[in-house]
């Protein structure tokens, strides 16, 4: 959520780097998004969906947290690429994991339910993040919370069922 809604504004206005710098970072985000599902699929082929999804959420959390470490161009670019790649990459991995858990015959229904739940949580998160930004005036708080939620998601996936039911 912090990157998809606030990233360019953070770079352009909060960091004072202008729209060109924000646009460049958004382009890198898009490049990552174009490559992310392909890379995530290859990793899932090797590790399985559960491990790949848990790892992707953890790496995405690190990517979201990078601007808390440094706002130099290399760190912002790395953050853009990582979060860009794992935004659609995690969706693909989550769909695969839902298919593993529900089984092929029930995948469509379970994925529909997961998608609806994601949309509801996304709407609530948007409200929460806008209120947090209004209350603190800090984009850093958004990135810290976003990274923490992604880390919790990784733990939840890792703690979930190890094997798909038969």
Image (cartoon, rainbow, N blue to C red):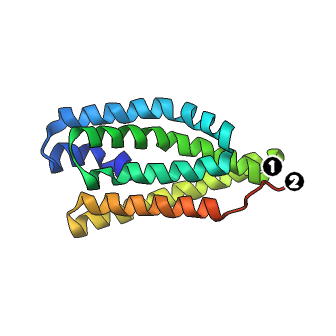
Question: In the rendered view, would you say 103 is above or below 148?
Answer: above
Question: In the rendered view, would you say 132 is above or below 61?
Answer: below
Q: Can residue 124 be seen in this view?
A: no
* Residue 27 horizontal side relative to residue 150, left or right: left
The kind of secondary structure element at disc 1 is: loop
Percent across and percent down for residue 29 are 37, 36
The kind of secondary structure element at disc 2 is: loop
* Residue 124 horizontal side relative to residue 42, left or right: left
Residue name at image x 55 percent, y 50 percent = 55
Percent across and percent down for residue 13 are 16, 47
Residue name at image x 66 percent, y 43 percent = 47
Give the Cα separation between the discs numbered 2 and 1: 8 Å
* Pair 2/1: label in front: 2
Question: In the rendered view, would you say 148 is above or below 16?
Answer: below
Q: Residue 158 got which mark?
A: none
Percent across and percent down for residue 152 are 51, 64
Instruction: Identify residue for label 1.
Output: 103
Instruction: Identify residue for label 2.
Output: 166
* Nearer the observer, 117 or 85: 85
Instruction: Pick whichever of labels 2 and 1 is earlier in the sequence.
Output: 1
* Nearer the observer, 76 or 88: 76
Percent across and percent down for residue 149 are 46, 62
* Nearer the observer, 55 or 30: 55
């Amino acid at each position: 959520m912090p990157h998809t809604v606030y990233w360019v504004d953070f770079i352009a206005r909060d960091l004072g780097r202008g729209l060109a710098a924000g646009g460049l970072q958004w382009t890198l985000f898009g490049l990552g998004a174009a490559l992310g599902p392909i890379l995530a699929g290859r990793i899932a082929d090797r590790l399985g969906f559960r491990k790949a999804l848990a790892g992707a959420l953890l790496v995405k959390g690190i990517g979201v947290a990078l601007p808390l470490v440094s706002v130099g161009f290399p760190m912002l670019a790395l953050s853009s690429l990582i979060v860009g790649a794992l935004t659609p990459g995690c969706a693909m991995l989550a769909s695969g994991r839902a298919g593993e858990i529900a089984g092929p015959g029930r995948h469509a229904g379970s994925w529909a339910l997961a998608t609806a739940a994601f949309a509801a949580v996304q709407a609530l998160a948007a409200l929460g993040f806008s209120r947090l930004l209004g209350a603190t005036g800090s984009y850093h708080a958004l990135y810290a919370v976003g990274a923490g939620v992604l880390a919790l998601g990784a733990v939840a996936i890792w703690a979930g069922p190890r094997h798909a039911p038969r």
